[in-house]
């Protein structure tokens, strides 16, 4: 192998991490010369200069499923967990180009995840897939668009919709690997925004701006119907895509109050029938199937991070 190529096989778990963490799996394996190079991850995530990278991992890892907030509200990005490539206008998810071909997301799970974590991630996929046509399947050589699921210490986050090429979904190993959280982030990748962003949300929830942290008000923006369509399914208090009552609260008081008596918001455990009805409508199909993990997700993957070209070697199965 050429010396330059050797350097490219430097294994970094997390594209922007300051410290590389060698993995026994990857360090022990050396890719054969004829290993295929996987397509570049064109959308590895972007963190603005004011991103609080020294605080977010701790906030997320100390989160408990019994907390009043949802963990994805803690990741320090737009609306908490919506990743963008830079300070530009938001993605136009109404664009048909943002849909995944054949209602299918090819995925690669970063090798650092344990078997138990991989099982939980697949359970999150299964929740989405079992009653819908939408599918997750392991990356195959030849796929151009795919999701790379990594466990870096930057919280839980995803882009909204298909970006073109590889795009990262981050599930911080401490704090984000719960099946409901997995489903939430993958529904972002499938093209969904948060439920309370809907144009008609003021008919369903009261946004109490007096309790919102200063500077976080824009996290409660509404989008017009061309961006956030409910496909006639209607508002869903129970949606796994809905903020909690105390999202971005500065004082422990509610920032979002359901207008309907007895309505519960802040589900972080499972998708709802309405979540799935919207997914089916978006992709125009209904039948379900099981999630599989085939042994084909290996190769080398190139990343551009800042001025550096990095590579991650995804080990082959034993
Ligand atoms: Zn989210």
Image (tube, helix red, strand yellow):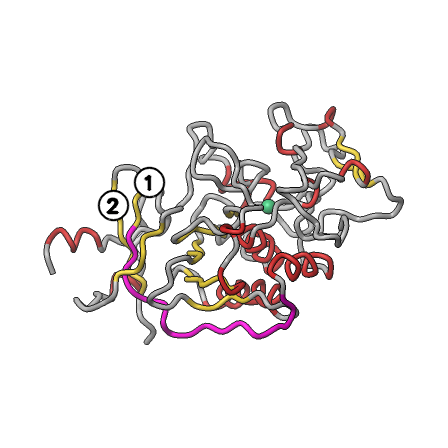
Q: Most extreme residue toward the right, as rendered?
A: 261
Q: Position of residue 134 (x, y in %)?
A: 57, 65
Q: Nearer the viewer, residue 199 or 188?
A: 199
**Quarter containing the N terminus:** bottom left
Q: Position of residue 236 (x, y in %)?
A: 76, 50
Q: Nearer the viewer, residue 108 or 23?
A: 108
Q: Nearer the viewer, mark 2 or mark 1?
A: 2
Residue at screen point 34% across, 65% down = 142
| Element at label 1 | loop
The residue stretch that appears in magenta: 285-302
Q: Which residue is the site of mark 2?
A: 309
Q: Is residue 33 magenta?
A: no
Q: Most extreme residue toward the left, as rendered?
A: 2
Residue at screen point 25% across, 65% down = 36
Residue 116 appears left or right of 298: right
Q: CA distance from mark 2 to mark 1?
A: 15 Å
Above or below, 159 against 148 in this view is: above
Q: Which residue is the site of mark 1?
A: 18
Q: Nearer the viewer, residue 178 or 311?
A: 311
| Element at label 2 | strand
Give the dominant element type of the magenta stretch: helix, strand or loop: loop
**Quarter containing the C terminus:** bottom left
Q: Residues within 10 Å of mark 2 (few under 14, many from 20)?
A: few
Q: Position of residue 75 (x, y in %)?
A: 54, 40
Residue 117 appears left or right of 139: right
């Amino acid at each position: 192998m050429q010396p330059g190529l050797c350097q490219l096989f430097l294994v970094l778990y997390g594209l922007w991490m300051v410290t590389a963490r060698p993995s026994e799996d990857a360090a022990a394996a050396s890719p054969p010369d004829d290993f295929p190079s996987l397509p570049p991850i064109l959308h590895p995530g972007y963190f603005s200069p004011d991103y609080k990278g020294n605080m977010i991992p701790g906030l997320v890892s100390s989160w408990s499923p019994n907390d009043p907030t949802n963990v994805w509200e803690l990741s320090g990005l737009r609306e908490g967990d919506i990743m963008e490539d830079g300070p530009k206008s938001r993605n136009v998810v109404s664009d048909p180009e943002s849909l995944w071909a054949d209602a299918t997301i090819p995925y690669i799970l970063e090798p650092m995840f344990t078997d138990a974590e991989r099982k939980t991630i697949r359970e999150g996929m299964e929740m989405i897939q079992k009653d819908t046509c939408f599918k997750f399947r392991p990356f195959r050589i030849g796929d151009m668009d795919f999701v790379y699921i990594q466990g870096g210490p930057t919280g839980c986050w995803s882009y909204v919709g298909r970006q073109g090429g590889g795009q990262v979904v981050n599930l911080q190993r401490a704090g984000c690997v719960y099946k409901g959280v997995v489903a939430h982030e993958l529904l972002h990748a499938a093209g969904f925004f948060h439920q309370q962003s809907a144009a008609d949300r003021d008919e369903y929830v009261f946004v109490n701006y007096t309790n919102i942290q200063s500077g976080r008000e824009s996290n409660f923006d509404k989008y017009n119907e061309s961006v956030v369509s409910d496909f006639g399914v209607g508002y869903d208090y129970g949606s796994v895509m809905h903020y909690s009552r105390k999202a971005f609260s500065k004082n422990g008081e509610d920032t979002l109050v359901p207008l309907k008596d007895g309505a519960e918001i802040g589900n972080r455990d499972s998708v709802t029938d309405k979540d799935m009805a919207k997914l089916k409508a978006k992709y125009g199909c209904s039948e379900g199937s099981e999630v599989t993990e085939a042994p084909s997700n290996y190769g080398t993957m190139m990343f551009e991070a800042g001025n550096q070209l990095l590579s991650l070697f995804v080990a082959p199965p034993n």
